[in-house]
Image (cartoon, helix red, strand yellow):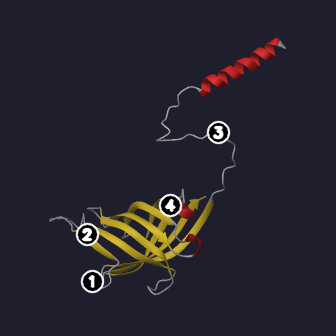
Amino acid sequence: MASLLSLVFAFNLIVMMSSSLPTTSSEAFAKESPMFVSPKPMEKITQLHFYFHDNLTKTNPTAMQIVAPPKGSVGGFGATYMMDDPLTEGTSPSSKLVGRSQGIYAIASHQELGLLMVLNFVFTEGIYNASTLSILGRNPIAETVREMPIVGGSGIFRYARGFALAKTYLYDPKSSVAIVEYNVSVLHF
């Protein structure tokens, strides 16, 4: 009995001493929560399909060049564009709007037409309203199907990861209009 009493006393002493030790982080910067048992929320996979409409025309542009390629640039290397392109359910620009693609793309390759894409898909429809998906990746636009990573998101897509497959539906170099089909697969909580 005495040894059990000694063990309980020693345990209480250790608990009291450890609670008086200084923490390793400032509460103004970070706060640590005590350990707790919680079931992990189940991840879902969401499949999205929509069309991206990029319009570089002089009337009603949805994208515009913000940095010109340097003198002597090969294939426009270095040209940078800002976009706010509509995302629609169908191929027609007048089909139902489901969101916008907002961000920057730049010609980032000397050898082929490869774009660096930094963009957010900002959704405006249904349960996805005000949720976003973020892409940061390479888009070799001469390839039939291009894969780019989903690196995050917000709203319903918080903690998102996945990929976007882009396929050019229409490109008219004379009018500077492109319609790109997107199939997106995203894991999220």
Residue to which mark 2 is pinned: 66
Circle 1 sits on which residue?
58
Query: Residue 48 at x, y = what percent?
Result: 55, 71
- Front of the two marks 3 and 2: 3
Q: Amino acid at mark 4?
A: Gly
Q: Label 4's element?
A: strand
Residues at marks 3 and 2 touching, judged by CB atoms closer than 8 Å: no
Query: Answer yes or no: do the residues labelled 4 and 2 have beta carbons within 8 Å?
Result: no
What is the secondary structure assignment of the residue under circle 2?
A: strand
Do the residues bearing badges 1 and 3 touch, measured as CB atoms within 8 Å?
no
Q: Gap in Å between the C-alphas at discs 4 and 2?
A: 26 Å
Residue identifier under label 3: 35
In whole angstroms, how far apart are the C-alphas of marks 1 and 3?
Answer: 58 Å
Q: Secondary structure at mark 3?
A: loop
For marks 2 and 1, give the CA distance. 14 Å
Tag 3: amino acid: Met
Crowding around mark 2 (Cα neighbors within 10 Å: few <14, some 14 to 19, many 20+) is: few
Determine contact: label 3, label 4, CB under 8 Å: no
Residue 57 placement: quadrant:
bottom left
